[in-house]
Image: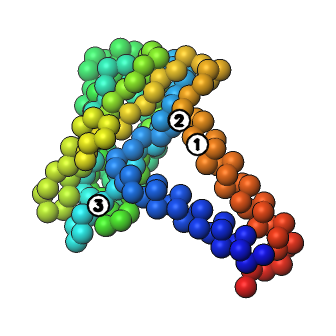
Amino acid sequence: MRQAVVAAATVVAALAVAAGADAHAGLSPAVAKTKAGQEFTLTVPTEKEGVTTTAVELTAPDGLSIFSFEDSPGWKREETTQGSGEAKVIKQVTWSGGHVPTEHLAVFRFVGSLDSAKSYAVHVRQTYSNGEIVDWTGPEGSDTPAPVIEGVSSFGGSSSTLTIVALIVGGIGVLLGIVGLTTKGRPIA
């Protein structure tokens, strides 16, 4: 029984460490259906010691249309747009005035849509309280990779990202099931 609990805890800890090791600006979901409204979540970690994240700027690539935003308490939002009326397009948004400490995430949500089935690199600029700026605009595998969204016309085909997420979630479910079976509802001591 204890071995199952230890094994489950080890796997969950390994998954948490692996997720934390890749602490870069991110945009989820990583895969989105084209021509459909979708809520996206931008996360930007404060990775530097002794400073806070005070501003985050997102520049939307061509083909990513942003419609609306969820309020972000403690942050002021400014939008840069092109066009007017029905043709108005949000090209850039800046959140400022917040104070996100080391090892915490600045989190922003917005509703948008992708025009076509392709990869979209979203440029993010992070400003720290000491004035240092990090541009999350690099290629995958760099120290400062841009968040990428993969636009797909349907979810009927295979997607390596969706497969990986499904396997991780399924693995955690199996481990929790094993723990539940071995403890038979008793508290773990």
Q: Relative to 159, does residue 167 appear above or below in the rendering? A: below
Q: Residue at x 20, y 49 (%)?
A: 134
Regarding residue 161, the answer to whether it shows in the image is yes
Q: Amino acid at mark 1?
A: Val
Q: Quadrant of the N terminus?
A: bottom right
Number of the front mark, 3 or 1: 1
Q: Nearer the viewer, residue 32 or 95?
A: 32
Mark 2 residue type: Thr
**Pointers 2 and 1 in contact (CB under 8 A)?**
yes
The span from disc 2 to disc 1 (Cα, nearest Å) is 6 Å
* Amino acid at dot 3: Glu
* Any part of residue 38 in sight: no
Question: In this figure, which residue is indicated by the disc labeled 2?
Answer: 161
Contact, CB < 8 Å: mark 3 with mark 1?
A: no
Going from N to C along the chain, the mark reached first, 2 or 3, is 3
Q: Nearer the viewer, residue 128 or 10?
A: 10
Q: Check disc 3 and report its element: helix, strand or loop.
A: loop
* Residue 159 x/y as whole percent: 56, 28
Where does label 1 land, which residue?
165
Disc 3: which residue: 47
Cα distance, mark 3 to mark 1?
A: 25 Å
Query: Residue 161, position in %: x, y?
Result: 53, 35
- Vertical relation: 44 (above or below) 119: below
Left or right position of 81 against 175:
left
Q: Residues within 10 Å of mark 2 (few under 14, many from 20)?
A: few
**On the image, which quarter does residue 149 sit in?**
top left
Q: Is residue 87 above or below residue 147?
A: above
